[in-house]
Image (cartoon, helix red, strand yellow):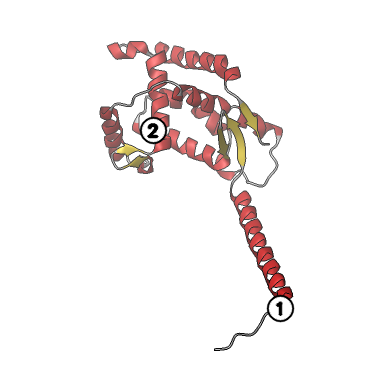
Amino acid sequence: MQFKSVSLETLISTLLFNIFIFSFSISVGMAETKLTDRFIFKVANQVYSLSDLKKTKSRLAALKCMYPDSLTHRIFWSDFTKLDLENIKFNAEFDKEQIKKFEDLLPYYKLMTYSQSHEVVVQEVLKKYFKLSATQNKCDLSVFEGKEFESKFQKVVQLEVFVRSRFLPSESQGKISVGDIDKAVSGARNLINSIDQQIDEEAYW
């Protein structure tokens, strides 16, 4: 078999053309990514996108379904329902009202970050209770990986354990009232205010 000789100029032209096509493909891929999601803010070293906020809302809903007395849900749910996260367009410019509502979500992620700096243990019996409750109440089972919580939901449960142990100490004695719940919510808000300046944030709107 004989091969045709190829000039150096032809090789260079072919190489440049392939590089252009490859670069164009990457650009198109990046453009498509930007159209399907959008970074909203950063808390500490973690960047959160619009999709992340939606997933957080879904996890809080799952927590409430499994555990109706969730203190975490009571503290933060109203902040996540102020925004119509499901219908926000990725490439639209946010107005002042939307920005204010995005800012209202920062306390959740700051308290989450703060709770992760403590050694919060989720007992195996709690995992079993949540799994059984989720099955019986037909909750979102995607937050489980077999018998374990998926990693992001594990942090949500750890936050729940953290706020209850810190702001509802009388619960361990089986004594809890509506007044105790209100005080716990207020206590959590006060803690958030105190750690606000300790945890960095950066907005992308």
- Residue 20: x %, y % from top left: 69, 64
Above or below residue 149? Residue 24 is below
Tag in front: 2 or 1:
1
Q: Quadrant of the C terminus?
A: top right
- Residue 178: x %, y % from top left: 40, 14
Q: Secondary structure at mark 2?
A: helix
Question: Neighbour class for label 1 at 10 Å: few (<14), some, many (≥20)?
Answer: few
At label 2, the amino acid type is Gln
Q: CA distance from mark 2 to mark 1?
A: 61 Å
At label 1, the amino acid type is Ser
- Residue 77: x %, y % from top left: 49, 29
Residue 101 image-quadrant placement: top right
Q: Which residue is mark 1?
A: 7
- Left or right: residue 93 compared with residue 2: right
In terms of depth relative to the viewer, which is nearer, 112 or 185? 112
Q: Secondary structure at mark 1?
A: loop
Residue 175 image-quadrant placement: top left
